[in-house]
Amino acid sequence: MRQKPNALKIFEALDGRITFTEDQQEKYENFKKGYQSEIWADKRFEKYGWLIIKSLTFHLDGEYACQIDTIIITGDYIFLYEIKWYSKKATDRGKTIQYYSGDEDNPNGPEFKHPREQLKEATEKFKRLMWQLGIKKTLRTYVMFTHPDFVLYNMEEWSLDLVFHSEVESHIEELASTTLRPDDESYHIYNLLMAENLDTSETMPSVPKYNYASTRKVVKCPECNGVIEEVPKNRRKLKCPCCGKLVLINDIAKKALEDYEVLFKETPTPTQLYNWCGGIFNRMRLYKLFYSNKQKE
Ligand SMILES: [Zn+2]
């Protein structure tokens, strides 16, 4: 399973409990899209029984270096993938990508660093990590665009390092037919790299600052993460007002507990959990659900 980045977990737990700034909202959307895109790619790669590292965040000399979305280790290569969920028309400007504004007379929209450039920087850092760990393998790197609606105009020369949605299946099939199965050394490399994995995304400056007092005391839907204002007292299920799905009340309480743990890195006492849920649950119900078993142990 691919782990959600810590920063995304915090954003999700804060969603509906604090008001995000525009920048924070944008960052949150990017995290969600990135994660969705990586899961999409995982499903394609998994068919072949490869050794896959689903997100590696590593540090060099104690400093955050970078995060690589997907790493595949075969008998003869290490593949690095930068995975993108871009969904609009865009044009390739060499070192940048520019989105179409939607206006034919004024087509130039926002411009940002080309993912190829991001991947180049990440690859340089990854090579340093390999050197430090004594890993010797040939590297191959690709940017994968996973959204079917993404179009990139004006590409420079043969951009064979860019894999588009329609090419993903054939790209992966080619990989399967031209690379060697993982061997003992591949597993050794996998273990070396995994030991370096340290997710510190929650310390990024774009992640909102918060404390207990600054958060709204509400409960949320385990399916869609929407705020639920009312919980019927004597029922087991309710229809979520945001997504319309039938959800178990116990699952709503469980989500409140998990969100508390994500945000404050500790398990709440029964009273803390009761207050955290805005008093929406019966105290006994919460107690029975989470604490009565622990007492018996
Ligand atoms: Zn919902």
Image (cartoon, helix red, strand yellow):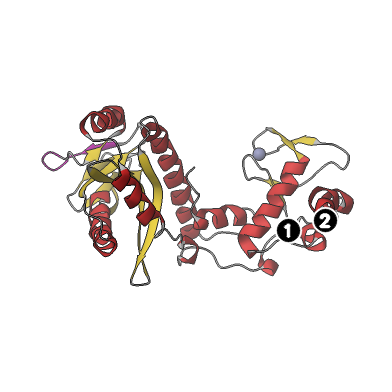
Q: Amino acid at mark 1?
A: Lys
Who is closer to the viewer here, 226 or 160? 160
Question: From this viewpoint, is residue 81 visible?
Answer: no
Tell me the magenta residue range. Answer: 151-158
Look at 23% across and 40% down and name the residue there: 162
**Magenta stretch containing residue 155, yes or no?**
yes
Ligand 1 image position (quadrant): top right
Quadrant in which residue 10 is drawn = bottom right
Q: Residues within 10 Å of mark 1 (few under 14, many from 20)?
A: some
Q: Amino acid at mark 2?
A: Gly
Image spot of residue 37 (x, y percent):
41, 40
> Would you place residue 84 above or below residue 180 in this image?
below
Q: Residues within 10 Å of mark 2 (few under 14, many from 20)?
A: some
Residue 279's disc is: 2
> Would you place residue 130 above or below residue 98 in this image?
below
Image spot of residue 57 (x, y percent):
39, 58
Look at 27% across and 39% down and name the residue there: 104
- Give the residue pinned by disc 1: 217
Question: Magenta region's main secondary structure?
Answer: loop
* First in sequence: mark 2 vs mark 1: 1
Who is closer to the viewer here, 269 or 130? 130
In whole angstroms, how far apart are the C-alphas of marks 2 and 1? Answer: 8 Å
Give the position of the C terminus as an image quadrant.
bottom right
Image spot of residue 52 (x, y percent):
37, 43
Quadrant in which residue 183 is drawn = top left
Contact (Cβ within 8 Å) of mark 2 with mark 1: yes
